[in-house]
Amino acid sequence: MTSWYKKQLLSYFPIFLMAITVIVLLGLVIVSDISRKETQKANRLSAQFISDTMVRALDEIETASLEELAANESVLTFTDQRESEEVDESLLMYGVSNALRALTDNNPLIHSVYLYRAEDRLMLTPNGKYRLDAFSDREFVEASLTAGRSTDIWSDVRNLRAPFEGSATPVISLVKRLPVPFGDRGLAVINADVRVLRQYIDETADDRVTYLDVVDERGDVAIASGSGESIADDVTFLSRIPIPNTKWTIRSGIQPGQLFAWFSLISYVWVAIGFATIVLSFGYIVYVAKRNYRPIEKMMNKLESIQLEALPDDRKVDDLSIIGQALERLIEQTGVYEQKRHESLVARRRQAFLDLLEGTDSIEEADWREGLPPVGREAADAGSVVIVAEIENAESFEEGTTAEDRSVMRLALQSFMQDAFGRGASSWTEWINGTRVGILCAFEAGETGRGGLLEAAESTRRWIEDNFRISFVFAIGTSTTNWRSLAESYVSAKEALDHKLTRVHDGVIVAEEVADYDLEDTIWYWTAAADIAKSFRLTQERWQSSLAELFDDFRSHRTKDREIYAVLETITKLLKKEIVSGNGTSETVAQAWWKIGIDRQVTGGKTLDQLEWDFTEALGELYRLYVAACENDSQQTVVIEMRNYIEANFANPDLSLKHLADRFGLAGKNVSQMFKDAFDENFVDFLLALRIGKAKQLLTETGFAQQEIAQQVGYSNSITFGRMFKRIVGVTPGDYRKRHEAIS
């Protein structure tokens, strides 16, 4: 450490520390004063907020309880049962207990709810029924009956020991007459858990800064925040907020011994002292700066006269030599900058490559002069093509390797691909992203070289897979003779990668071999998916042939991977909804679904053949279990036969629930419920959907009159048919036909 540097530190540090200390102290005084006022204000707002929260919570459970007591038929029957009425007492008690249990489960604040029937002094809780004489809360009920307790005010805190609970729970209770609101046949007692109310306080109030107690009308503490210990009587409370509809009052204030209490003793004299200190410090700094500037001036003169060369090793290092070495480092950094500028050419090459592929026209003549590969310029007057190679097993490539290892591996793969594709043509290889490599190949004028590219791609893929254990798929884009059209070749290569499942060559896709297809050609996929799921659900064997036909169409149309997966996922979701998540689902079938792993089969295939095999085998195994489950379930068999019968005879105008009951030998009242439970759809809605769907087909594909169509779909007259058609479709049959003709 040099003498001049020490002098600077000893001159400025004491002044700096003293000035900062005074400023900090003054700041603390001001902040403490503001904090005290804001804390008092916030304390009252916090207390008011807690009061509002508690009132709102109590009102919500009171409202929910009253609505349930007033609307629940079981509760009304329990309190207003007449001797002439024949009611199953056990079923009634079960319904009331469920209603009370639902109230408790849906409202965490409710500890318990029980009912008292005056006629036979019966107590009913969610857990059972008791006689009043044997009820654990008998004293409170008898006091409520004797004193005519108010139905609007919550009681004081009391300890309630519910049946099957080891310890008593502090609660407050609200008594309501039954039937609500002013009945005389019984009582309903709603018990709110005081511990939950205490949680509201603990979540809002910070007991490190404030204290908050809830006291009853006698001044006794009902709820204390924080550790639960009440505040001493000699503490001054800043706020007292009554809680409506209860006998409670919130009192709160600031915890004693806080830091701002000490600062409140500080006089404003300190402000004047601090200001004077700052003024004196400023003057002293000016004086010291002027006095110490003279050596700096001499040093600057020295810098102007010395030569910028390295200092001898035996020379004593002083302030000026340090500055000289700093200048030398500056010169060295200039050299490093030039080196980094050269290294940045790699990044510029990659960006220029991406610009060529994306057709941004941002490459200029200067870029070629500064080292970009000439293949880009050669593409202007020769045949060129873009190849995109994508890692298929990206997860295994990332797993178990560090970022540095992956960087080295990417560089090695890039170099190998550059050499492999550069043997028969000029090539330029760059990584496009973490999983894709772009290769730009240019040929001599009049040559295409596509056969050589296909062979190079296949051999490169095999070599990389054998030596790096990384599987690539290569997509060869369309040829172009204009470097500005390279973007089109790049786009075609990317689109070809969407056909990995239906590729013809092993690991290589040629864009020109992927036929374009109209989106309308794939619309029937979704209809086929629904038909396969429906056939499966109805145990019709034709689902297998439909699935095979679907995969054959995938191959013939070279359907995109994402559409194939989407169609298969649709089939999976429909089957899952119908036979796993639906009503009446067999436990055996549900367990088999997860064991076989139908969902995993959708993305489990590497090729379309493997995907078809895995998916068909999985569905076949599930189908065998499903058919066996249906055969063991006679009701399920009847329901499936019933649905098949409806689909085959929906045009019968006499088709109804009664007709089905007679046809299948069932009770009329059970047919509708069986159909609803099995298919989660009403019989009427299902029949109407079949008829309207068939009517749409006849309206768009035939020239039949409306009356004739009505008769073919099960309606005796066209008026009823037209009214039902408009209700479902939104337009009349005639307008529907006109719209379809206009679109066609």
Image (tube, grey):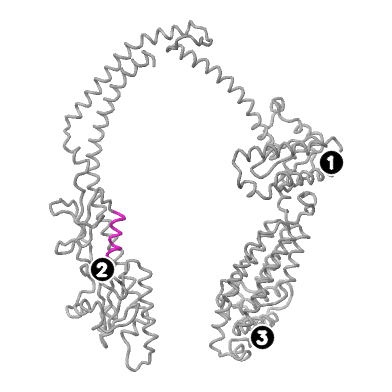
Place residue 661 in its image quadrant.
Answer: bottom right
Does any portion of residue 692 appear in the rendered image?
A: no
Q: Nearer the viewer, residue 443 or 722?
A: 443
Q: Which residue ends up furthest to the bottom in the rendered image?
A: 84
Q: Nearer the viewer, mark 2 or mark 3?
A: 2
The reply, left or right, for residue 374 in relation to residue 104 is right
Residue 181 in percent (x, y) is at 27, 78
Residue range corresponding to the magenta coloring? 194-204
Q: Amino acid at mark 1?
A: Gly
Q: Residue at x 18, y 78 (%)?
A: 143
Q: Quadrant of residue 720?
A: bottom right
Most extreme residue toward the front is 314
Locate the N terminus and report the quarter of the image it occupies: top left
Q: Is residue 427 left or right of residue 646?
A: right
Q: Give the secondary structure at mark 2.
A: strand
Q: Which residue is mark 2?
A: 171
Label 1 sits on a secondary structure element that is: loop
Mark 2 or mark 3: whose residue is earlier in sequence = 2
Label 2: few (<14), some (14–19) or many (≥20) C-alpha neighbours in 10 Å: many
What residue is shown at x 66% (from left), y 45% (from top)?
A: 435
The residue that mark 1 highlights is 449
Q: Is residue 429 above or below residue 578?
A: above
Secondary element at tag 3: loop
Q: Determine whether, in the image, residue 722 is placed left or right of residue 60.
A: right
Using the image, tell me which numbered label, if any, was put on residue 110. none
